[in-house]
Image (cartoon, rainbow, N blue to C red):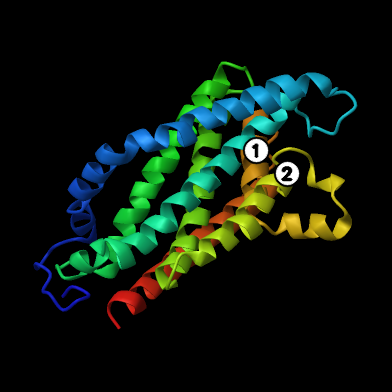
Amino acid sequence: MGTSGVPTAPGTSRAAMVARQADYWVTAYRRTWRGSVFTSFVTPLFYVVAMGVLLGRYIDPARADLQGAPSYLAYIAPGLVAAHVMQIATGEVTWPVLGKIKWDRTYLGMVATPLRISDIVAAHLLFVLFRVATTSAAFLVVLAFFDVFASPAGALGAFAATLLVGMAFATPLYGVSAGLKDQSAFAVIYRVMIVPLFLFSGAFFPISNLPAPLEAVAVVTPLWHGVDLTRMLTLGTLEPGPALVHLAYLGTLTALGWWWSVRRLSRRLVH
């Protein structure tokens, strides 16, 4: 039985129910992909050139604490990738989620079919994962030309890490958006959470340079875990203990965010 009370065909798996929504997401992306080219692929290149290449010329790796990176570009590259997928994931689960509830009411149409709430959330988050994966892959391919990876395996590991970073932000913020009555909170989310995380989670400089109270705050933020994990993989300095902590933190946040998203959207559309 679907969430709305419409019967679900016997023997229909969750994967099949999610796959039924593929046509919608493919069609939606074919109509909107041009608008995402600049923010997804061009903006990261500007950051690499401006911050890594141009600014990096003035930073002496021998005097700066770059955590084993041979250059400032190699130091900030993984941080830029992790921070960028955070922004992409956030953008895909804020206005789009509220819009499908309140403005174009796509979710209301979906919930009137045999689809369950969890099917709807899963399909949307799979689309977010696709957006994160394509953006991260393009970013990492560009970085490969700057010779910032210690090994191909490290680059692949960094790609996987950025997928987890994207989902660690997408799932809980999906839950936030699903319960909002209007869009005014999104400005607060960007100004109070996303921008400070981008600047002070270790992407541009070691968090040990921050005052002790701010360093303690930075250590518990999800982006710092993502940046540190991605950086260890790209530089070839992976330490099993800290890496497992990062994976457990981001994985737990993703799982709890998924559970909360389904719960919040169920309350919004069904109850």
Given the image, on which type of amino acid does mark 1 rest? Gly
Residue lying at 33% horizontally and 55% vertically, measured from the top left: 124
SS class, disc 2: loop
Q: Which residue is mark 1?
A: 79
Quadrant in the picture for the C terminus: bottom left
Pick whichever of labels 2 and 1 is earlier in the sequence: 1
Given the image, on which type of amino acid does mark 2 rest? Gly
For this orientation, the residue located farthest to the right is 63
* Left or right position of 41 against 216: left
Residue lying at 24% horizontally and 61% vertically, measured from the top left: 106
* Left or right position of 8 against 61: left
Q: Between residues 56 and 232, which one lies in front from this camera angle?
A: 56
Q: Between residues 165 and 211, which one lies in front from this camera angle?
A: 211
Q: Which residue is mark 2?
A: 202
Query: Residue 115 appears in which quarter of the rendering?
Result: bottom left
x%, y% of residue 40?
47, 35
Q: Is residue 59 above or below residue 183?
A: above
For the residues marked 2 and 1, what is the alpha-carbon distance in whole angstroms?
7 Å
Q: Is residue 256 visible?
A: yes
Residue lying at 61% horizontally and 47% vertically, measured from the top left: 226
Q: Is residue 235 above or below residue 1?
A: above
x%, y% of residue 143?
57, 23
Q: Are marks 2 and 1 in contact (CB under 8 Å)?
A: yes
x%, y% of residue 120?
28, 62
Circle 2 Cα neighbour tier, 10 Å, few/some/many (<14 / 14–19 / ≥20): many
